[in-house]
Amino acid sequence: MHKRRSVHRFVTDGGLEIKVYRIKPEDAENLVDLFKHLSETSRYLRFNEMLSNPDPDFVWQTAQHMALVPPGQGAAWLAFADLPGEPNAPVAGARYIYLGGRRRAEVSVAVRDDLHRHGIGAELLLYLARHARTHGVKQLVATFDTSNKAIWRLIHQAPYGILTTVRGRETEIIIDLTKPVEPEPETTDAIAPVQPDPSELSKEKAMPEEVITKFLVANGLELRVRPQTAADAARVAELFAHGSPEKRLERLGPALGNAGQMALAEAVQVMPFSPHDGCVWLAFADLPGQPDSLVASGRFMRCSPDEAEMSIVVRDDVQGQGIGGKLLYFVLDQARAMGVHRMTSCFASDNEAVWQILSYSPYHVTWQPRGKQVEIAVHLQARAESSPSLN
């Protein structure tokens, strides 16, 4: 390894220096070592199949294949670090493979389990994206398990326009390299300077405005979800004016003088937060005679680093089409990816739609009756095993 020249170097927030090398056929052994440091869950999320006790010959053959990436097919890298008792240990890998022509490529990133949440995957993805862009790639695509919170964190951190399409347990992302969200430094294959504490890669960075997630709901209606901007205030006020309070999932505030004041106050309430305070998303759909209509909003506001309050508002005339459920689970997944452990909210006790949505929650839900209201807590670190439970 000492004779190889690294193409990129960086330092994690914890002070670990990472050296990145172009992959070579002789790296098959290093890929096997990296694979051994992936948990069964990580292996499933990476390879889309259970590999709890794989055949060693199969692992070796797969590693040999992955280590051989001719220039005409794409590019791949391995990242190494000096760990306690493991000098020059392979800690992560990244690659893109051309799809058809060279304008689109499939991307994959893997980091060994004991080094998750150190920013290694995000930095590798940034380097890969810059390299792919300079070699003519316009779009990077990937399909991953919707429950893979690590990928959702990478989406938050990517400085490019991204389209995500959720299809049940599978989510597809398309990273548009022609739409950078912010200026990026020039990159070559020369040795890069060490970059300590890259604050722009914080796990609490808000999703760029260009990120759009698509869902299909009832009757084939396409729901397009994107972060809210300051320019959306008037449309949000209109949404709240057409979304009855008794049909919402939110913590009730003090009553105001009239409907106009209430709508304005609610619109101000869901103005964009700083990344440390929370996030707001808007959902749009093409309704008959009303293209690109704002039909729902979802948000969470932090109460503490680990806890947040959420709100889901759906326009009255599009209730019952699954919009609220899609947006609710999207907000929960995004909050979990951004470090929130517990989400709270309220709803009217006779709101059967919310009861039904919560019964399918992938996370554990507890609830407490409060008069005509029900207060809920969604525990994002615990998977659901049954219906919401009474505390």
Image (cartoon, rainbow, N blue to C red):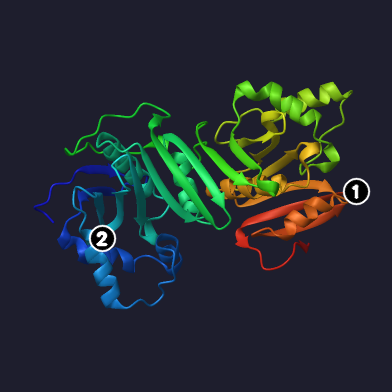
> Does 198 appear above or below 172?
above
Q: Nearer the viewer, residue 245 or 320?
A: 320
Q: Nearer the viewer, residue 254 or 215?
A: 215
The quarter of the picture where the C terminus appears is bottom right
Left or right of 179 on screen, residue 355 = right
C-alpha distance separating marks 1 and 2: 59 Å
Pointer 1 residue: 372
> Does 389 appear above or below 224?
below
Q: How many marks?
A: 2
Q: Position of residue 146 (x, y in %)?
A: 53, 55
Q: Residues within 10 Å of mark 2 (few under 14, many from 20)?
A: some
Q: Which mark is residue 66?
A: 2
Left or right of 11 on screen, residue 302 = right
The residue at the point 36 percent across, 26 percent down is: 183
Q: Is residue 79 visible?
A: yes
The quarter of the picture where the N terminus appears is bottom left
Can you tell which quarter of the image residue 83 is in?
Answer: bottom left
Q: Residue furthest left?
A: 3
Residue type at mark 1 is Lys
Q: Position of residue 213 (x, y in %)?
A: 55, 41
Q: Residues within 10 Å of mark 1 (few under 14, many from 20)?
A: few
> Does 361 appear above or below 221?
below
Left or right of 136 on screen, residue 70 = left
Q: Position of residue 158 (x, y in %)?
A: 42, 39
Q: Which mark is residue 34?
A: none
Q: Position of residue 265 (x, y in %)?
A: 77, 25
Can you tell which quarter of the image residue 8 is in?
Answer: top left
Q: Is residue 85 visible?
A: no
The residue at the point 77 percent across, 44 percent down is: 249
The residue at the point 36 percent across, 52 percent down is: 108
Query: Helix or strand or loop: what does disc 1 sit on?
Result: loop
Residue type at mark 2 is Met
